[in-house]
């Protein structure tokens, strides 16, 4: 399965899910038709995801994980990747992303370690999350394909410049928080659009992302919502509806991670090219 041919183009997110609930919901998602499963070291649910994917053909699934900034060193990434694979009970990851960029980290050892993992067959695709265009310009100087960018994308926010850059450089886009953490469930504009198709605002939001060429990663915790979120391939939004949602999203404000005491770093959305990974 290549990124450009992932079908269906929607994934299941496992943030804030652990244990039996997480494992059962991963199974429910796969049985519904999802083939992309997203997790991360931060989520502390890798063992549950591993149990959830057991019994299914591994080659038919696309498993994504993300490594937290405190492990953005050669040794940290090597250790995290091996622990991830062990808990997932898998020989490889389909995609491995830097969860947030960290300007204090040395970028050269990070890239070298990722390339070594790809060569060893432990990793298929490399990507980054929560970045701006300047991070991508910096990474393009290295001899490693950037397969994915996972950023916040939903009807209340989209980074127009980032989307255009990724499309120009054939970098795939994934959307975390595609339903704005539930903010759009009662959205009047999306409700009105949804009534035309017999769909909910959540289904409209996910369909909008898919038609943009983005893979949304909703993470509902109930069987009903997991199925509902997947039922978005029997209708299509008009060009006018797409433009309406996109124009409003471009005016939105992103979630900001600005608590260094809690996380040890802050987001870098405002960083210039020179500020992105200055330490080789």
Image (cartoon, rainbow, N blue to C red):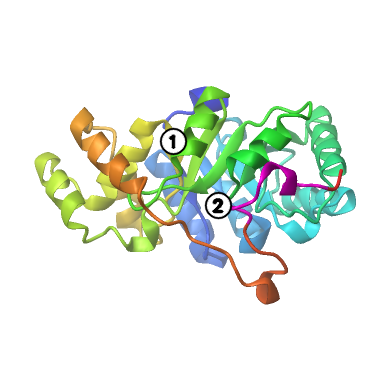
Q: Can residue 1 be seen in this view?
A: no
Write the residue at 34% across / 53% down: 156
The numbered disc on residue 134 is none
Question: Which secondary structure type mostly characterizes the magenta part of the structure?
Answer: loop
240 over 54 or under it: above or below: above
Position of the C terminus, as image quadrant, is: top right
Q: Which of marks 1 and 2 is nearer the N terminus?
A: 2
47 over 214 or under it: above or below: below
Write the residue at 34% across / 47% down: 249
Question: What is the secondary structure assignment of the residue under circle 2?
Answer: helix
Disc 1 and disc 2: Cα gap in Å?
Answer: 25 Å
Magenta stretch in the rendered image: 268-278
Residue 217 forms part of the magenta stretch: no
Write the residue at 38% across / 43% down: 32
Q: Left or right: where does residue 236 sit relative to residue 259? A: left
| For discs 1 and 2, the disc positioned in front in the rendered view | 1
Label 1 sits on residue: 214
Looking at the image, the residue that sits furthest to the bottom is: 261
Looking at the image, the residue that sits furthest to the left is: 196
Label 2 sits on residue: 52
Give the percent coordinates (x, y) of residue 147.
62, 31
- In depth, the one of 197 and 27 nearer the eye is 197
Give the percent coordinates (x, y) of residue 2.
57, 24
- In depth, the one of 77 and 82 nearer the eye is 77
Give the percent coordinates (x, y) of residue 213.
41, 30
Q: How crowded is mark 1: few (under 14 residues within 10 Å), some or many (20 or more)?
A: many
């Amino acid at each position: 399965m290549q990124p450009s041919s992932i079908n269906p183009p929607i994934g299941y997110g496992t943030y804030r899910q652990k244990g039996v609930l997480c494992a059962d919901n991963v199974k429910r998602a796969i049985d519904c038709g999802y083939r992309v499963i997203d997790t991360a070291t931060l989520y502390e649910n890798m063992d549950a995801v591993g149990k959830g994917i057991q019994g299914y053909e591994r080659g038919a699934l696309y498993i994504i994980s993300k490594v937290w900034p405190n492990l953005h060193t050669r040794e940290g990434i090597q250790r995290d990747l091996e622990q991830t694979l062990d808990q997932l009970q898998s020989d490889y990851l389909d995609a491995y992303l830097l969860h947030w960029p960290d300007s204090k980290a040395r970028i050269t050892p990070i890239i070298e370690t990722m390339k070594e993992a790809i060569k060893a067959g432990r990793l298929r695709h490399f990507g980054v999350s929560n970045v701006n265009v300047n991070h991508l310009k910096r990474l393009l100087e290295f001899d490693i394909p950037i397969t994915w960018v996972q950023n916040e994308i939903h009807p209340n926010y989209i980074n127009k410049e980032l989307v255009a850059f990724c499309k120009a450089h054939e970098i795939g886009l994934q959307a975390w928080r595609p339903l704005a953490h539930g903010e759009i469930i009662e959205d009047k504009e999306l409700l009105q659009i949804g009534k035309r198709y017999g769909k909910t605002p959540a289904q409209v939001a996910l369909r909008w992302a898919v038609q943009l060429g983005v893979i949304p990663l909703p993470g509902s915790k109930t069987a009903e919502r997991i199925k509902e979120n997947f039922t978005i391939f029997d209708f299509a939004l008009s060009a006018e509806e797409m433009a309406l949602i996109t124009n409003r999203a471009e005016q939105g404000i992103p979630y900001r991670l600005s608590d260094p005491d809690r996380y040890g770093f802050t987001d870098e959305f405002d960083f210039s090219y020179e500020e992105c990974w200055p330490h080789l």
